[in-house]
């Protein structure tokens, strides 16, 4: 099991290269390193500015991209082309986020419920990973500018509840930004490391990490023992944070002045202005008893006492989540040894006190709550660099392991640098009606197309009983034992038919070959991701054509002639776009087809539902 560093510029092995820690946040992101002299973690900042880079990306009319503070200015003036909170979209399909689609002021494309979401800015379509890569690129450049040295390697943090797809999207974002992502680390684990927890082998503790940021709340319960962090449970609310507190203050002021919220919405500039005043009041009240400010000729007033009364319901909500997390982990409050505070909103004294009272112990809040996760990521990076001998380094997989999926894409089941032993599984389905076999081809490598990776093995899962396309549930599982032997199993879950194969994962791969494979994956990241996006767009386009065709055949009598003609024309246009190498064109044509079929599809569905409901008491 190897762990090697490569210098992207020269392609040579390098041990001393700097590895940065990155907190890629919903609202803000930042980058940290271990200071070469003090050996302490520090967040990187330009002179006199904040270490926080707002996670906002703006696209102008001619394709220029700005990130951070600059981009944030466009949130009010150009909401369609200013992307915020992209972290909420990482690794998600439209189906996953449709209930919250209205919270985005930019266009989130809903051309297929199963496929990953895309965002439209101008005439272009971006995946969340691409959008996040712009933020990461900004952080990389910032670090290079401050450190005056190339930065090519990073540890990036994600919430503990992120699933495989979300973690993979984060890795992709790093790769697109030209970063070799050495490890994806859970945010609460990073925060604990920043407090020195888990840095010694004999540490054996149960930790609660309370993370209240600008827009999200997470509580994670962790157990550290023998240098290993285990997530016992997570809970939270993906739409609860400092923004809600600001909003509550605005509401209070409006009530005081007898102004309705609807009136506020009509004047966007005023709404934004008063919101900023509310945030300023909240921050001021963390250290003072009364806030008073003249705004637009009116006096805005709020006391700490009123403020605390207003936010009590939010605090209570977070404590309910804490209670649920304890319940899920099967723990009593007394079992928690340490409570760690993360996120800017935990600066509110009432929040610190309430959380401390809930867990029955004072909270740990000595590290800057905005920076604590990035600082922990830098510590993790330092451990990976081999600089902290005290921490147990587990054996890891040197290259990602996965299988071939539609269009020749590599679908990673066990990412590179994963601990060994390890297991992972994912479900796939059939593409054709009555399909009786499925070929499972196993690959090793970092490239997006399997043809660029190393093929390790292949086998056929046969005897799948006849059923319509998409109904079979084939679970492919990878199991790597402590010796690095990989067992791949495929099982159709409805019928129970299964097949497996044993592979030696690192088959005679030399360090030089390994190094070349890693280097290739980064130098080709841009083209690879573009190809992947094109293949995905084509597959989605083909699927849309197929489902539209089927739907029309089944429901012809309920569709007007005009609708049929328009649909046929849109299908033809989509078909034609599939022959061209332009993913944006395919998305545009798919969107157009959806726009035409959606009204009659909804009409037919509604009719079917009302027939089904007839005669039933509701
Ligand atoms: P984060 O997402 O962790 O960067 O947290 C950002 C949130 O913390 C925003 O809602 C800020 O308004 C809030 N915040 C920052 N400083 C303070 C403070 N002193 N008191 C209360 N909230 C704060």
Image (spheres, rainbow, N blue to C red):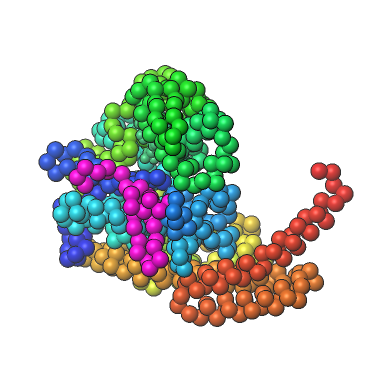
Relative image position of residue 422 (x, y in whole percent): 40, 49
Toward the viewer: 71 or 154? 71
Q: Quadrant of residue 169?
A: bottom left
Q: Is residue 474 left or right of residue 189?
A: right
Is residue 161 in view? Answer: no
What residue do we see at 53% from left, 70% from top?
588
Toward the viewer: 261 or 337? 261
Q: Is residue 85 left or right of residue 572?
A: left
Q: Quadrant of the N terminus?
A: bottom left
Relative image position of residue 32 (x, y in whole percent): 25, 45
What residue do we see at 58% from left, 41% from top?
262
Q: Quadrant of residue 553?
A: bottom right
Instruction: Tell me the magenta residue range.
Output: 46-75
Instruction: Judge whether residue 70 is colored magenta.
Output: yes
Is residue 268 in view? Answer: yes
Relative image position of residue 504 (x, y in whole percent): 36, 61
What residue do we see at 36% from left, 53% from top?
71
Toward the viewer: 462 or 53? 53
Q: Is residue 395 above or below residue 118?
A: above
What residue do we see at 66% from left, 78% from top?
568
Toward the viewer: 197 or 374? 374
């Amino acid at each position: 099991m190897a762990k090697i560093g490569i210098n992207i510029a020269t392609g040579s092995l390098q041990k001393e290269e700097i590895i940065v820690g990155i907190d890629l946040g919903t609202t803000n992101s930042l980058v940290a390193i271990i200071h070469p002299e003090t050996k302490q973690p520090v967040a990187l900042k330009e002179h006199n500015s904040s270490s926080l880079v707002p996670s906002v990306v703006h696209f102008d009319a001619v394709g220029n991209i700005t990130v951070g503070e600059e981009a944030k200015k466009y949130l009010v003036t150009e909401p369609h082309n200013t992307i915020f909170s992209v972290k909420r979209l990482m690794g998600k399909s439209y189906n996953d986020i449709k209930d919250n689609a209205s919270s985005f002021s930019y266009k989130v494309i809903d051309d297929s419920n199963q496929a990953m979401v895309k965002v439209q800015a101008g005439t272009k379509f971006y995946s969340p990973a691409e959008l996040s890569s712009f933020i990461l690129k900004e952080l990389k450049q910032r670090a290079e500018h401050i450190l005056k040295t190339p930065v090519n390697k990073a540890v990036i943090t994600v919430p503990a509840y992120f699933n495989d797809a979300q973690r993979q999207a984060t890795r992709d974002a790093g790769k697109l930004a030209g970063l070799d992502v050495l490890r994806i680390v859970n945010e609460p684990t990073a925060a604990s490391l920043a407090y020195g927890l888990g840095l010694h082998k004999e540490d054996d503790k149960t930790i609660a990490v309370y993370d209240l940021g600008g827009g999200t709340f997470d509580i994670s319960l962790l157990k550290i023992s023998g240098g290993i962090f285990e997530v016992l449970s997570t809970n939270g609310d993906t739409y609860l944070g400092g923004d809600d507190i600001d909003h509550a203050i605005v509401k209070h002021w409006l009530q005081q002045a007898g102004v309705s919220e609807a009136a506020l919405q009509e004047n966007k500039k005023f709404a934004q202005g008063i919101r900023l005043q509310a945030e300023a009041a909240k921050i001021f009240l963390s250290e003072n008893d009364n806030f008073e400010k003249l705004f637009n000729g009116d006096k805005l007033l709020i006391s700490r006492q009123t403020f605390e009364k207003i936010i009590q319901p939010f605090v209570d909500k977070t404590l309910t989540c804490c209670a649920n997390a304890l319940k899920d982990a099967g723990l009593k409050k007394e079992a928690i040894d340490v409570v760690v505070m993360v996120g800017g909103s935990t600066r509110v004294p009432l929040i610190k006190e309430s959380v401390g009272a809930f867990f029955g112990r004072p909270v740990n809040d000595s590290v800057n709550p905005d920076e604590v996760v990035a600082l922990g990521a830098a510590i993790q990076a330092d451990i990976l660099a081999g600089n902290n001998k005290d921490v147990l380094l587990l054996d890891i997989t040197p290259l990602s392991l996965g299988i071939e999926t539609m269009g020749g894409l590599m679908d990673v089941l066990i990412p590179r640098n994963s601990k060994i032993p390890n297991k992972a599984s994912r479900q796939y389905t059939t593409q054709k009606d009555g399909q009786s076999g499925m070929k499972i081809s196993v690959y090793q490598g970092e490239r997006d197309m399997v043809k660029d990776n190393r093929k390790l093995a292949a086998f056929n899962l046969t005897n799948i009983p006849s059923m319509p396309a998409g109904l079979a549930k084939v679970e492919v599982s990878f199991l790597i034992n402590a010796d690095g032997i990989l067992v791949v199993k495929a099982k159709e879950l409805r019928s129970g038919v299964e097949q497996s194969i044993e592979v030696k994962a690192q088959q005679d791969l030399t360090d030089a070959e390994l190094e070349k494979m890693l280097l290739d994956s980064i130098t080709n990241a841009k083209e690879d991701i573009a190809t992947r996006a094109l293949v995905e767009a084509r597959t989605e386009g083909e699927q849309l054509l197929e489902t539209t065709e089927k739907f029309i055949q089944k429901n012809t009598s309920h569709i007007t002639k005009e609708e049929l003609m328009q649909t046929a024309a849109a299908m033809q246009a989509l078909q034609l776009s599939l022959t061209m190498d332009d993913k944006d064109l395919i998305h545009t044509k798919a969107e157009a087809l959806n726009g035409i079929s959606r009204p009659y599809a909804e009409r037919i569905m509604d009719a079917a539902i009302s027939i089904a409901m007839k005669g039933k008491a509701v």
